[in-house]
Amino acid sequence: MMRILLYTPRGRNVVASIIFSSVSIVCGQILLFQELSNYNLSHCRKINTQKIFFLNQLDTVETEGIANKKLGVSNFAMPDYCTKYIRNEDLTTIIEYANGSNIYEAEAIVRLLGDSYSKTEASSSIVQLRLLLILMVSNSLSLVLLCVNLYEDNKDLHGS
Amino acid sequence: MESSQARLARKIFLSVLVAATIFGANTLYFTIIRNMAQASASQIEVKEALAFSIELDKHLFYKDWTVALQECNRVESEKCINAIADLIIHRNRTEDYTAVLVNSLNYGHSDMQVNSLSRLVNLIDLVFKDDFGLSLEAAKKIGIQDPKSYAYKIQEINPNNTITLRRSKKISESSQSSFQKLTTVVKGLDTDRIQYKTLDLRSTILYIVLVIMELFIFFLISSIDLWNTSVTEGRKHTK
């Protein structure tokens, strides 16, 4: 069976068309998985953005009095499922700040987290764009090969 | 009698139908779980922000207001102006928390948490209106934008400096009580995080099942295509 498929033009076209279609399917699935992951990332970003919003509201408050006060670290920690979206180079600094944070360190943490999430989101967009391009190309190639076979079929039906 | 090839084709066809049914049912279940995860995520987003904010407020606003406002027998003093500014921010943040509880966490106006926050806002409004002699609403109407201008206006209205803050102790008490009630809202945050994580994991597993089913269907259909092609081409070559 494989011999006939690989040694006849029509067979080769079908095999190649199936390979390109499977590449499209795999790309589509990776893209959907990335979308699920992006939802989690945007959830983590929203949590952080709201923290920044509440911190910004304090801009006019006299915070000197509590500058050295240790704040409850547990309230500054992001959920553990958000940690995977923090870039490694930011993670070390964030952990340093998080050890007994005061209000200024808390500000630094949320801003660092914000930057880190943005960068992760940007790099994920680049990957998604590339995958979309691969998906489009493989889909088109698969259709072109299908078209060649249909043309051959047509020739067989009506005579060349 | 049915040939072995025809039997195989029928088996593949039936397998595709079964796989497509599993795929359909799984898609439905996946959508339901994703919706549950999204609802859970929204609750966590609000509670996380609230937990963070009240941790800051605990040190800034849930304090002894009698001490903070004691300098206000001289309204123009810097300490009093700062205290007025803090009190306004405390009021606005309390109002924000009320909106968050009602709009995002579906609390009712009759719930004790919302009630407690509303009482605190009303109390602070009364302090400005009765004790200082100028409500925040009236101040806004006459174009007062900052606490300093507010303090000067109070001084203008009340040149003899006869301000007696009778409600500062009450503000402290009401603040403490609101703080206690707010902490009950964010208490279940850890459970919510675990619930979201579980839902997310479940949806990932369902997604993997979807992927496997899709690939299975694709390869079954492709195998029929390859088989048909090899048979047609084989016949052509043997002619």
Image: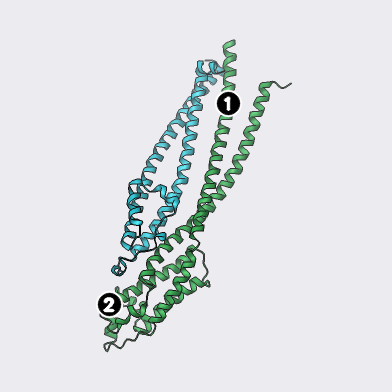
| In the image, farthest residue toward the right | B1
Report the Cα–Cα distance between label 1 and label 2.
82 Å
Between B88 and B50, the one lying in front of the other is B50
State the residue at coordinates (37%, 41%).
A126
Q: Position of residue A138 (x, y in %)?
A: 45, 30
Establish if B227 lies above or below A79: above
Mark 1 belongs to which amino acid?
Ser
| In the image, farthest residue toward the top | B239
Which chain does the numbered disc 2 sit on? B
Question: Which quadrant is home to the N terminus of chain A?
Answer: top right
SS of the residue under disc 1:
helix
Q: Position of residue A32 (x, y in %)?
A: 48, 42
Q: Where is residue B60 in the image (x, y as percent from the top left)?
A: 35, 70
State the residue at coordinates (39%, 83%).
B167
Establish if A56 lies above or below B79: above
Instruction: For residue B143, say whether it is visible.
Output: no
Instruction: For residue A136, say whether it is visible.
Output: yes
Query: What residue did someone put label 2 on?
Result: B79
- State which quadrant residue B172 falls in: bottom left
Are the residues under badges 1 and 2 in a single subunit? yes
B216 horizontally vs B46: left or right: right
Between A113 and A80, the one lying in front of the other is A80
Mark 2 belongs to which amino acid?
Lys
- State which quadrant residue B215 falls in: top right
Mark carried by residue A18 = none
SS of the residue under disc 2:
helix
State the residue at coordinates (44%, 47%).
A38
A146 horizontally vs B138: left or right: right
Q: Chain B is drawn in which colour?
A: green
Query: What residue did someone put label 1 on?
Result: B223
- Chain (cyan): A
